Structure formats: structure tokens, C-alpha cells
Amino acid sequence: MSGVINFTFDGRALTAKPGQTLAAALLGNGIKLVGRSFKYHRPRGILSAGVEEPNALVTVGEGGRMEPNTRATDLFVYEGLVAISQNRWPSLRFDAGAVLQLVARALPAGFYYKTFFGPPRLWLFYEKFIRRAAGLGPAPTEVDPDRYATRAAFCDVLVVGSGPAGLIAARDAVRAGKKVMLVEQDAVIAPSLLCDPQTIEGKPGHTWADEIAAEVRSSGGRVLTRTSASGLWDDNFICLSEKLVEPGQVPEHGLTQRYWHVRAAEVVLATGAIERPLTFANNDLPGVMLSQAVRTYTNRFGVVPGKRVVIAATNDDAYRTAAALRQAGAEVVVLDSRTAPAGQDSGFEVHNRAAPLMANGGKQGVTGLIALIDGAERTFACDLIAMAGGFTPVVHLHMQAGGKLDWDAAAQAFVPGAAPHNVRTVGLAAQPQPAETLGASGNPKAAFVDFQNDVTVADLDLAWREGYRSAEHLKRYTTLGMATDQGKTSNMTALDRIARREGIAVPEAGLTTFRPPYTPVSMGALAGASMGEHALPMRRPALHAVHAARDPIWFDAGYWKRVRTYPQGSETLAQSGLREARAVRTSAGLCDVSTLAKFAVQGPDAVQFLERVCATTVGKLAVGRGRYTFMLREDGLVFDDGTVWRLEANRYLLTSSTGGASRMATWLSYVRSHLCADLKVSVVCVQEHYAAIAVAGPKSPGIMAALTGAEAPRHMSVVHTEIAGLPVLLLAASFSGERAFEVHFDASHAEAGWQAIETEVQAVGGAPYGIEAMELLRIEKGHLVVGPDIDGRLTAQELGMGKMLNTAGGYIGEACLQRPDLADPMRKQLVGVEAIDGGAIPEGAMLVREMATPAEGHVTGSGLRVIEGGSIALAHLRGGQGRHGEVLYAHSPTRKVTAKVRVRSPHFYDPAGERYRD
Amino acid sequence: MGKYSALSLLRGAFNGQSHWQPAWRDPEPKASYDVVIIGGGGHGLATAYYLAKVHGITNVAVLEKGYIGGGNTGRNTTIVRSNYRQEPLSRFYEFSLKLWEGLSDDLNFNVMFSPRGALTLGHSDADMIRLAEKGDAMACQGIDAELLSRDQVMKLEPCLDFSRSARFPIEGAMIQRRGGTARHDAVAWGYARGADSRGVDIIQKCEVTGMVMDAGRVTGVETSRGRIMAGKVAICVAGHSGHVAAMAGLKLPIESQTLQAMVTEGVKPMVNTVVMSQSLHCYISQSDKGGIVFGGDPDNWPSYAQRGHAVTMELAVQQGLALIPALSRLRMLRCWAGVTDMSFDGSPVIGLTPRDGLYIDGGWCYGGFKATPGSGWLFADTLAHGRPHPIVAPFALDRFARGAPVDENGTGPFPNHR
Amino acid sequence: MKQIACPHCGNRAQAEFIYERTADSVVPLDAEPAVAVAALFTRANLRGMEEELWRHTHGCGMWLLIRRDRVSHDIEWIRPIGPEALP
């Protein structure tokens, strides 16, 4: 790779080399101060070279692509990258928030639990300032212009991490004939070989790695870079998030990330280990870095982060950093905590039994390190301090799989123990390099453990002193490990501190849980394609195009798109609804009722099945006849209603509510399979097989006769006939209170059927109607709907349908209906109410005796007398069936509307059913 | 116990904050107590606090198998509200909300109760009517409820998707302005500190393994730290109620399910209220640290595993993004799960049991956190007097057999049918 | 997310299946009120193995009886039930 890449940081135009991370590029430009900390606004630089970075967070991208809190160490610079530092005002160098450092002594861990008392409104006031000061990056306001894909995959072996151990595992699997997926969060395969170049099997490390990656690919496996295995769930279900472009970058084809659902027979975790910082005063200054990070910048990115470097070390790995720095021309001093000479190349100045005490310096970086060597203080001038505090294996996915941890005393680290689900860990994650731990030294108030959340050793000690001693309490009280890095560099240091305070071994100090995701995952990636209008499915009935052509007012009924009214000219919703309802009362109307649930129930035992499911009698139904029915839950309460039709001797059609369709389908299947397995009956959901058109109104029998060439069937009868040459099932049923029919076409004939019927309806001066008119008509008639009226809380008796219960019993729900409190006469019961002061009755209003008395019921559906006018409604009222004639108020405080109403029967229109007779 | 105040913090600035004492003791269990409370979550600790404070019953132990507040108390989405439709529920939660309003002062521990408003969005006229019905029911009991127009919602919560092409267009909302959020851990710690200072023994790492029974009466518990006798035993272990009740030979109207929540990385203020929806099961708020906190549906099958289902979590994110599209570029930082007691009408179970001397507080479904002060107060009253307090009487264990469920959703006895 | 071995379709993601109820909460049609109330409104809710009814709703529709551990989610066995499962 050659050339330069242009980018900006806080508006400053800078250049990077190809392949550099933003952190590398900033260091290459001599920039050490990158961000400000969360609580005290302390100046911070770059700590690490990987996903564990707590300090160097920036906002990248513009407009809807803006991504706050992006780790500069996990972002590869692209042409035009715009990066902005965070949590500072007015600028990174002069941050007004830094004044908090002056009062930090009065703001220890959990200080907010101990002050800001007073009424909640007062806290709300303080909180406003705290919230503004908290947060990290800016809140996004624009809609993301890019898309996210979701993809499913299966493999035999998923290898997470492409270091040497992962590559060997992948190669072994490929050669055993397995289908392999190899994922790497970095942009290159085997990034560790760029940090520590070496010869493997006689080849340069990178040649060796590329050959294995090629072998995986050619065997039909996949190699994914910039891909993080974020979570491991039951049965090796692994979620991967793959960056197709860098954060904030404009994708070529609109796709920014791909989220993978992978099912793997075996998972190999080659996730490596994260280096631990050391805890000494001012260990958070810009210019204090992890030792391996220093080596990575030097060897991989060609940026030497310091000229005079002090490495504070507890292990041998530090000497590799020292060697790399020396080769790059830097001066190096190693302060090794151990007594024994390390036995390494002694070409550097090495001090044993040495511990760092305090870094000197400021926001422009460190200038020196005060160390304690054999009990004596000594100052080393330097411009970079590297910390080699040992290694913490990345065990997150192992833990998510339900794995146990073992304590590796030589490495002073938790390593993966027993794991279920065919998950194993290899490489440095399983066998980290040996290291000592070094307790905190120097001023505990300035020795940082969690850098991003500004948790110091003093904070941990305070929490311990106050009794917050379990690992979870300590974490929650101090906020340790709760920043965007989730404690990747801080959890072990904190555990070590608790163990030292308690005088116990680290494993006894406990461990907090590793929750998914391993690194934060874009919300957009989690949502995938299910965004915006695709957030949930939209169901359109077969006649949708016919309705859409009229530009109606729509109504969302669950997932269904239905028509509310078909306004003409400048009609309002209410005007068009009333006009449509009046057409039905005076001539005729047609309405799409296709969404009703419909079930074909057939077989010699069909009637026995129906008499279980329906609480009304079905057995007496003659062929060609139908009736209203309702269904009880097993607890005895009514949950749905519909109609049942005997089409042939052993063949029935059962309809039920639109909203309850899928519930009813599952219920019928349950009853059939578990309660009536011995019956010879088949139950098939035919909801979408038929498109149903209701034709209602006094002129509907004539319309049916004209369409079918035969006399219309009488009320509650059913015939098979033809309309416009199309076979139909014609049911004479009414929801509106007028003579009415439901014409069931095969769904593929729906449009032709509608045209034929509409022509006839319009010929008599009628019109199509929607749900609004249907509501007005059915409320006036006193017909119930599932939801507001049949609300799953009332018995059939309470809904005024007790007389319809099958007196022979045997229906589901009968047993639980015997429970004593269901017979309480002061439970709610269905009533009608009509306005007696000329006002409109607000739907949903409470029924009260006086304004200040408790609610005794509520209005379930409110409408009008369609022809005469006047507000009427259905309601649930305590003991309502015995209270006809009583005057109450329908009171809606939220809408500031009240209507005086009289309780009465819910049947406002044609209670005797005379209009059903021809 | 040192009093918490700004002044004492300031004093600490000059002594290195070295004057603070443990917030609660770490006592050895005694052989017997007047009341043994199983479960050191918010409910158990609050019950102990009010037993001591209101009823003067201080010979009380709270037994916690792990560390206090480590179960659902520390795993919820911290929402506090009393906007229920069914009167027994709104009455109960309003009682609780009133206690929340004075809780920080009462406990001398800032629980950060932040009444920034509980906003329930309506996406259609039908939604708005159901919201009005709920609001009217609340208002008739003197509980604050207000309907907001689309424009008012736009001013209050501009981050929502107000485009007409939205899958869930916003028609308006109901707001309970006194609703909001609180700091969950602080509730457990504040009650623990308050109870401890009144003499209650809070015993952590003490797992109850059995009940001591005498002629059908519960007289104590077996624990991992020995037998502890008790005048009364109270179960406050929502999520695990079935498991503990089984030790007394009881089967409950409860099934345990996993409920997940998640939080994004922190950003500057973006979501001002607690946003809920009448049509979607999704609730969103922003924590004081800036993370956007999300909750959704439970995994709809029984589980005692504190880990959820990846797809359920993704569904909650999809619904959240449908409401707030600008969340797309934020990153999910962490998701976690709790085990919830899903009761058979969606309402809690509080009160007496068929075993003398044994009381239960459980069945909290999604609603346990906001109930904490109310349930603690009323359960303590119930324990002290040996009869249900009238406000919790509708939530008696025997209501299912009697036929008196308190069914907020009208969906019947199966939690997974909700 | 678990995989459930549907006897008809093979290993499928748990998201395709719907949990209905425990096997012991099936209320027989002729149950006496006391039996029905007990079956419907109380659960052992064991922290361990239970037998449960599931359905491959977003697949073949078959009902399954599954013995499953509620802590580990491990499945001990799966049996098809109902008329569709008859030989």
C-alpha cells in the first residue's frame, strides 16, 4: 500500500498512511491528547491498540452517519474521515469541565447517593445538569441513510480470532473435511503477526497466515475480517457483526454492516488476551500506554510513540516491546517488578524490584516517571510510559456459553475451564503468558483503574469500606467496568484490589458476568432490514388494490390494513362514516370483511368438536343453516365470537374475529390435538382462502337475487351459488342489523366479485362502506366486538348471552365458570347507555354517579342513532343488567367531556329482529 | 450510621472521605427471629425496613442467597409509574408512587427518583381511545393522567419518528407526568441501610434450602448457614417464587420466564421521558449516564436461566428503532436478563398462603421495581397484622380459585398468550 | 437460541416454535371444577426438568411433547403428539 489518506481531527487537516488506525494516525501526527474523561474531564490519550480502548473515543461521520463513541484504536482511517473529540467544551485543550478536577475530592464514588435530597422536582432540576455533563458523544438526530443486512449461516467449526492458534485450528478443521468460518475483528488476518513478526513453519508469518486463509476459502469456508463475534447463545448460536465499511464511511452500495446468525457445530475461541495496565498515580495521562500497544504502533503501523520510554513491567513480554523500541531508535528503560533477572537481552537499562509510583506531566503528555526501586524513589525522564501488567484472557464467549473459569496462578489470570456446547478455547486465551501482579502504588486518588469512568483506587477502597464488597456491588457502586469498554482493562485490577483488601485470593473475590455483546454492536445491525415501514409485517387483504384506488381513510387493525371510510369530495371522517351507514340503513352497502377468521371444520365428528369449542348449541343446526356463537376460554370467560354454518352434513364453516384469528387458530389446533385427539375431524384455517364481501341493507336481498338469479337465502341460511360466473359461498348473516349477506369468493376472484356486486349496489343508490360505518351500525344494533366489548373479563351471562349457553353443557370453560366470585352480581355487565343531555358520549369514558365518585363502569363503544341522530353507546357497568333506567355520567377527565346518560338495554335498533324478515 | 449530606461529602474532601462507615453490618444469623424474610432484593429489604420503621418489629432477618439487590432489583429498566387500567392495580401502584416521591428523604439515600414523565404513545385513533380510557380510569381515582396531541408529543420528545410513512405513526400520547425512573441499585442499598440501622439483620450468602414445618405451620427455614426459626416467614423472591414455595409444598399461579433488557453506549440527552407504546411492547428511557435503556417482551417460555434469547432482543431493538430511527447508529453496549414470576393474570400475588406462618410477595411479571416501596409497606402491614392490607387484598393467592383475577390485558391465565 | 429437533422437519431454530403449556396443565374435557382449577391455575414451576407442550407453529405445525431442563435449557427428549403424529 502506498500514498496518503486525508482526514481531519477536530477540524485539523491531517494525513495517515494506508492501513493505519485513527489512533496510529494521530500518534503519527504527534497528537497525544485525544479525549476527556467522563467524570473529571481529565485529559486522556491513547491507552491501547485494540477494542479494549477506554480513553480514545471520538465521534466520526456526518449527518445521519454520525457515530459517537467510536474507538480511535478500532477505526481504520479512510479518505475524508471526519473525527471529533468528545466530552469537552469549548475545546479539547481548554475544557471548562476540567474545573471538576478541583472539586473531585468532594465527589468520591457514589457521591450522588449521599446528596441532592429534597422533593423529586428538585432532583429533576439537578439531574438536568448531571445528564448534560454525563453522556459521552453527541446524541444523533438524523435518520441513518444506510442499510444493514442480516444473514444466516451454518458451519461445522467457527473459529473466533485469526492469530496463529486460530489459524491452526481452522486449518486442522479444513483438513478434517469440516466447513469452517474464520472471523477476525481486525482488518487483517493474524494482526498479532504484524505486531510480532516471526517465521512459522519456515515461512514469513504473514505468508503462512495468508496461505491458511486461502485454504479455508478454497475449501468452501468463509474468512471474515472486521467481524466481531458479539454473543454466543444456546446451542452454539453465534451472532457476528461484520463492518462492510468503517464507522461513518459512505458505503458504495448503501450497505454498511452485515449481522450474521451462525449456527456452529463447534466453536473454537482463539480470542487472545488483553494486557493489563498498572495502577500508579497519574497512570491516565496522555503518553501512558500498554506495552503491547506501543509495540503494535511501532512494528505494525510504523509510528514510534516515544523517544525516551520507560517500561514498567511484571513479565517477560515487556522485553519484546523494549527490543522493538530500541530497533526503532528509542531509548528504553525497563522497570521490572520481579527479583530474578529476566534473563532477556540485557542491552537495555533494567531495574529489578521496581514499581512505578507516579507519572509526571500534563495534557501534552508525560515528562517523567517516579519509581520505587528497592525502596528508594528515583525519577526517570521520559516522553512515554509503557505498562506491561500481565494478560487477561478474553473469556467472554466462553462464559456466555456457560463455561467455568479456572485460576492460573502463574499468569495471575482466569482461564477457561470446563465448557459445554462444544466450545473450546485455544492459544493465549487458554494459556496466557506468566506474569506477576503488582498492587496499586502512589496516591490512590490519582491511580486510575477504570479510565473511562474515572474510577480510582481510592474509589474502590471507599466502596470496600462502606460495605460494597461483592464484585457486583463494587462495580455498581463505583461504576467500574460499566463504560463502553465494559471493564476489559479494569475488572482484573479491581478484583486484585478487593482480594488484597480482604486478604483473600483473587478467585475468592468473585467475578462479574460477561454479558453480550463482546464489543458494542450497532443498533441498526441488530434491527437489520426490519426498519421503518418494515419494522413489523403489514397484511393487505386481497381487495387492497380496489380500496387503494379510492384513496380511502385507512385503519390499522393489528397487522391488517383496512378501510375506515371512503370519503367523497371534502367529507370528513365522521361525515363519510355517517353517510355510508345511512346508505346501509336505507338502501344497501358493501364492505370488505375478508380479514375475519374462517375455519373449515369437517369430518364425521365435526359437530362434537364444535360443541366443545363453541359455548352455544351447534348440534341442532340443519344443513344450510347457521347461527351466532361465542367461545369461552378454559377459565370460563368469553374470549371470541363468530358464526357457525353447517354447509353439509359433516362440513361446517366457523368464523371468528379478525384480531383473534391467530389465537383462535392455535386454540382450535390445541383442542383438536390434545383434548379431542380421538375425534374424526379436520380443522383448517381458510382465512385467506376466501375474500369476503358483506352486502347489507334493505335492498340487499334484491341485489343478491339479481346477482345470483335466484331468491336470496333467508336470514342465517347458507347456499353455494355463482355470482358473475364465479362460485361463491353465500351466507345470510347480519352485523349491521339490516338484512345482509356475506359473499365468500375464492380470494383470486375477489376483484371481479367486488366489481359485480358494487355495480348492483350503486344501481340502488348504495355505496361501499368501511369500518367506521360498520361500528355505527353494530353499536346501534347492540352487536359486540372482540376487544372493547368482549374484553376477556366477562362471562356470557354478563355479556347478556347467558341464555345462548348450551344447556346440555360439555363446552370448554364450563368447569371454571362454577367459581364462586364469577356469580357476584356486582361484577361488570354489558348495558346500553343513551345521552339525555344532547351531548356526545365519549368512548372509553368512565361511568360515575357524580363527578367525584368512583368509576362504576366504562363506555366500550360509542355511536349514534344512524337515522334519527342522538348519541348512544355500549358500556360495561357494575351490576348493570339490574340498573336499566338509572341516570349516570359518562365522564372523561382527560378529554374534559362529560355526558349525562341513561342506562338501558344495549339493543337500540330493531330489538325484535323484524328487519331480518323479508 | 453517618447521615448523608452535601456537607458530609465536603467534610470528606478534607479527610480523604475516610469517615464513611459500612452502609450495613454483616452479622451472623441468630437462632430465631420474629420475622424471617427470604430474599434480599428491593421487596424483601423494603418489607424489613417498614416492619421496623412503621410497626416497630426489628427482630427481623433478611436472608439473601447471593448479594443484596443482585436479582431483578438490579436487572430491570427502572421505570416508575402508576398508569394502569384496572382499579386495584392503579390504586396499588399509586400508593407506591406516592412513597417514591418521598423516598430519598425518608431513606437519607438518594434513589434518584426522576419524575420526567411516563409517555405512552398512541398510533391510531383506536389507540388514543384506549389511552383515554386508561387516563379517565386513573383520573377518576385522583391519579394524574393527561392526553397529548401529536404536536405536544413532538415538542416533548422530538427524537421520535413523526413521519406519516412511519410504520407506527404517532397520533398522540398519554402522559403520567409524575412517572419516571429511579436508580435501581440505590433502592436496595437505601432500604438495606435504613433497615440495618433499625436493627434488622441483613445476611448475605445465606441460601434457604428448606422450610421448617410443624403441624402444617411454617416455623422456620433451613439455610446454607443452619436452621433459623421464625415467628413468620415471608417469601420475597420474585422470579424464583415457585422454587421457594415448593419447599412448603405449594404450587403457585406463576411460571418463571426470562425478561431481557439492554442499554446502548452513553450519549448526551436525547430521550427526555420514559417512552412506551400502546401497540408495541417496547419501553425506552435514557439513564443519567446517557445510555438508552430498552426493554421488550419476555421470552415466551419458562426458564430459570438468567440469559435470554437473541431473537427476542433483536425484536425489541427493531421496535425501538421503529419509534426512534436515529438510534440506528448508537451501539448496544450490554444486554442482560432476569427471571420473572409471570403470574396468571399479569398481577402480583401478595398476602397469606395456605400454610400458617408463611406469607408471599411475588408474581410481579414486569412490574416489580416500581412496586418496591408500596409492596414493602403493604406487605409489612400484612405481616404485622396477619391479614391482607385492603389495598393488596385483591392480589390474594386464592383469587384464581375464587374467580376474581385482576387481568389488566384481559388475556386469561396463560402468560405466554399475553 | 436453542435448536429443537422437530420429528418431522429436523433441527430447527427455537424461534419457529411456540410454547403452549406444561403437560400437567392440560385440562381434560370432563375435568371436575376443582381439578380444572388446579390444573389451570397452579404450576410446579420446577427449577429442573419439566414436560411441556410445544408446537412447530412456524414450520410443520406439529405438536410436540418436550422434556426440557429449565435452567440449562437442555432437551432430554421430544415426542410428537396429537392426531398428526399417529402412524
Image (spheres, rainbow, N blue to C red):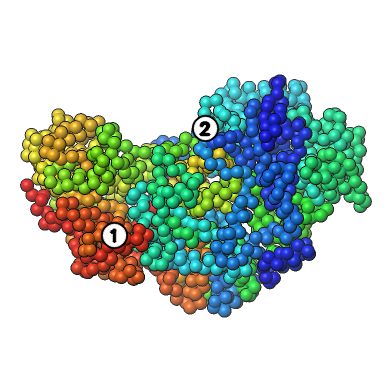
Q: Is residue B64 left or right of residue B154?
A: right
Rendered position, A49 above or below A664: above
How far is the residue under mark 1 from the one under mark 2? 46 Å
Q: Position of residue B152 (x, y in %)?
A: 44, 51
Left or right relative to A486: residue A811: left
Q: Is residue A49 visible?
A: yes
Residue at image point 70% right, 40% down:
A56
- Kindly tell me whether residue A800 is visible in this rendering: no
Question: Numbered disc 2: what chain?
Answer: A
Q: Which residue is mark 1?
A: A859
Amino acid type at circle 1 is: Val
Please state which amino acid type lies under the numbered disc 2.
Asp
What residue is shown with label 2? A146
* Mark 1 secondary-structure assignment: strand
A5 is higher (above) or lower (below) than A295 = above
Question: Where, quadrant-wise, is the N terminus of chain B in this rendering?
Answer: bottom right
Measured as percent of width and height from the top left, residue A525 is found at 53, 37
Q: Are marks 1 and 2 in contact (CB under 8 Å)?
A: no
In this rendering, the count of numbered labels is: 2
Secondary structure under tag 2 reads loop
Residue at the spot x=46%, y=54% of the render?
Answer: B119
Chain where mark 1 sits? A
